């Protein structure tokens, strides 16, 4: 257990300068062999569920699931009166996973379930009092039945477990519903007879009824009523459960009781039984004594409790340990900084090597992929596949959709055709910005978004007009108005993979139509990254382990070689930037190697073995190649 007993004075903001202020000093570290460590880009954690409750002395406390680049690593308990905080590491390896659901039970115990472990935290005992391994992976919904059992249903195969707090017995019922896509279960409910029901999405919605006595699970929604979306179930105070296969389209209702399914008209009203449970966004604000948790901010490290009876607020700062948020990718901006975004929390960061100084600000969404071009810096973001344009060196104005004064400025979005961007490029003539990625939850096949810089208008081409059921993973602008694209067979999150193998294609930017495509590597699933040589050839990685060169004029492969044995896997990320270009020089980043690529012979030369595994690229600024590992930024002095 890590105990942090720092309680700052009421209203004090000392210790918050790292993220509240525009910038702060870094202390770069020389690691030898040309490498330097520049620090953590976003040195805070994100919450994955917060509840207001009391400890064993009836003191008002906030319980917070903490999440950084390692995963859900700890439970933080913060005293709302004093700000004193105590951190309890989770009693199992987080494994990069984190809470997606949690519940505060009627016995005042806090539960979650991730990385294949179910866990109980008791604020009265101030300790984790139970944990046990289950079938993978993490709960998407949790509930408590009338007998006090805690139920958890898990992604990706609808695993179900129950836990009896009175006896400490956990029952793992295994996987209950089979699909050929990853299942999301965002609601679960138990009727007063002990039957359990949960809703599934996103490729095709479904409701499963489960009888704990017979251990039989039954999918109840007929094929005709299934569709994209997430089914929902709600426990009523009358002891029954009500469900819909597709609430978003107002589908038919079901009454669910003792395993019986009755189609009913839309209920006039549902009196939902209250539970302190939700997704990773859980924020339960009511303390038992009537006061409320107004703010519990892990970025600013501030907790605010309000008394509704008097209107008075108690404000304190708190502390916790963190290894920082996950870096999505980085690139060199026109103002001489290295910039990018982090995920959870969603932040913008900029490192100034000349001053050894960091800046960190709230970002608009998750900056999945970034692309500097001349004096601009473009961003492709999750969710909704949005496109931003930032002008470095000019005042930062938080992004507001529709505001021309914002900097970064919101240009367009492309959901559901693109939800999670994977690449972002500017055409060789500078006229067009192109965004690519995978589609929305439950969808298969991603489109391309084109932004005309002269007209300020966007055009979205759907996957059916490109390569049906494929999404574009990587792009490389070519001369004469051509664009090379490499696809992935991966669907949107929770979607069904339908294409058999990934393809390389050539697209005419004038018509926005594919003029050639082929599955050059049988069985390949993704073209990890692409880049164009000065001579107009296309270099690329397939599935992170095969390097190739392609000549777009005769449309043939001119080179291919396995690289995984010598260098490990090429950098692979949501926006990988595995290739880094600096003038006529081309570098390639592997998890365990920095290399230079000869664009004429296609030979790959090892330059250095990094002291850490490279997770995301990558750009060159003033002769140094910058890259990310987890939450940290490093650089290498190029020879």
Image: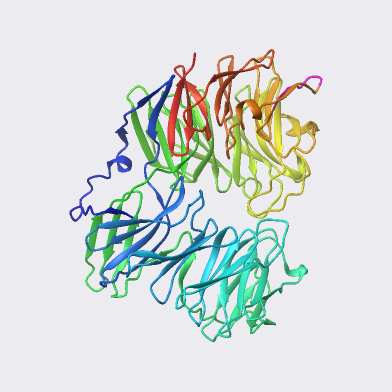
Work out whether residue 423 or residue 613 is closer to the camera in this orientation and state it: 613
Determine the image quadrant of residue 447: top right
Residue 394 visible at all: no
List x then y, in percent, for residue 427. Answer: 63, 26
Q: Residue at x 46, y 22 (%)?
A: 636
- Image position of 65 (left or right of 79): right
Work out whether residue 227 or residue 409 is closer to the camera in this orientation and state it: 227
Q: Residue at x 40, y 32 (%)?
A: 350
Position of the N terminus, as image quadrant, is bottom left
Magenta-highlighted residues: 547-554
- Image position of 382 (left or right of 62): right
Residue 293 visible at all: yes
List x then y, in percent, for residue 148. Answer: 48, 79
Q: Is residue 620 magenta?
A: no
Q: Residue at x 68, y 23 (%)?
A: 539
Secondary structure mostly seen in magenta is strand
Rendered position, 313 above or below 371: below
Q: Is residue 552 magenta?
A: yes
List x then y, in percent, for residue 41. Answer: 40, 37
Rendered position, 167 above or below 601: below
List x then y, in percent, for residue 267. Answer: 60, 81
Rendered position, 500 above or below 108: above
């Amino acid at each position: 257990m890590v105990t942090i007993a720092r309680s700052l004075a009421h209203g004090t903001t000392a210790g918050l300068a790292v993220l509240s202020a525009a910038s702060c000093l870094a202390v770069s570290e020389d690691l030898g062999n040309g490498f330097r460590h520049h620090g953590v880009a976003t040195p805070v954690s994100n919450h994955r569920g917060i509840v207001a409750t009391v400890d064993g002395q009836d003191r008002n406390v906030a319980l917070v699931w903490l999440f950084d680049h390692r995963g859900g690593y700890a439970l933080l308990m913060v005293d709302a009166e004093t700000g004193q905080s105590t951190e309890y590491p989770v009693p199992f390896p987080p494994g990069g996973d984190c809470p997606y659901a949690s519940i505060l039970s009627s016995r005042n115990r806090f539960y979650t379930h991730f990385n294949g472990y179910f866990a109980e935290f008791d604020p009265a005992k101030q300790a984790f009092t139970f944990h046990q391994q289950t079938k993978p992976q993490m709960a998407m919904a949790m509930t408590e039945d009338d007998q006090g059992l805690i139920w958890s249903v898990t992604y990706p195969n609808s695993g179900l477990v129950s836990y009896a707090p009175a006896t400490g017995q956990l029952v793992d019922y295994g996987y209950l519903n089979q699909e050929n896509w990853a299942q999301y279960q965002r609601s679960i409910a138990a009727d007063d007879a002990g039957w359990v029901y949960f809703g599934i999405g996103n490729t095709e919605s479904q409701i499963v009824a489960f009888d704990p006595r017979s251990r039989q699970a039954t999918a109840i929604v007929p094929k005709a009523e299934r569709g994209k979306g997430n089914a929902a179930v709600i426990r009523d105070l009358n002891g029954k459960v009500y469900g819909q296969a597709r609430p978003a389209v107002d589908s038919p209702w079901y009454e669910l009781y003792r395993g019986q399914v009755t189609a009913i008209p839309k209920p006039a009203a549902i009196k939902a039984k209250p539970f302190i449970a939700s997704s990773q966004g859980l924020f339960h604000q009511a303390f038992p004594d009537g006061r409320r948790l107004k703010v519990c901010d892990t970025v600013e490290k501030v907790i605010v409790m309000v008394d509704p009876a008097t209107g008075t607020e108690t404000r304190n700062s708190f502390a916790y340990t963190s290894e920082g948020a996950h870096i999505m990718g980085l690139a060199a901006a026109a103002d001489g900084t290295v910039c990018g975004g982090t995920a959870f929390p969603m932040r913008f960061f900029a490192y100034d090597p000349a001053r050894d100084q960091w800046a960190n600000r709230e970002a608009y969404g998750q900056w999945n992929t970034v692309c500097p071009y001349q004096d601009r810096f473009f961003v492709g973001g999750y969710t909704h596949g949005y496109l931003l344009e930032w002008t470095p060196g000019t005042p930062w104005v938080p992004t507001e959709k529709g505001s021309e004064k914002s900097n970064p400025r919101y240009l367009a979005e492309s959901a559901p055709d693109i939800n999670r961007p994977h690449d972002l490029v500017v055409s060789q003539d500078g006229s067009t910005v192109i965004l690519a990625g995978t589609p929305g939850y439950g969808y298969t096949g991603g489109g391309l978004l084109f932004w005309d810089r002269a007209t300020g208008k966007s055009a979205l081409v759907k996957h059916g007009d490109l390569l049906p059921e494929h999404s574009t993973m990587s792009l490389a602008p070519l001369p004469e108005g051509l664009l090379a694209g490499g696809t992935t067979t991966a669907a949107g999150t929770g979607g069904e993979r339908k294409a058999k193998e990934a393809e390389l294609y050539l697209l005419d930017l004038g018509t926005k139509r594919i003029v050639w495509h082929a599955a050059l590597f049988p069985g390949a699933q993704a073209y990890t990254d692409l880049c164009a040589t000065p001579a107009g050839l296309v270099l690329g990685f397939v599935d992170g382990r095969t390097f190739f060169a392609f000549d777009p004029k005769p449309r043939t492969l001119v080179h291919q070689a396995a690289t995984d044995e010598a260098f490990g896997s090429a950098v692979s990320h949501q926006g990988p930037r595995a290739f880094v270009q600096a003038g006529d020089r081309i570098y390639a980043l592997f998890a365990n190697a920095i290399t230079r690529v000869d664009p004429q012979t296609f030979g790959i030369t090892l330059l250095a073995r990094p002291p850490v595994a490279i997770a995301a690229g990558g750009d060159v600024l003033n002769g140094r190649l910058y890259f990310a590992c987890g939450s940290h930024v490093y650089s290498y002095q190029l020879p």
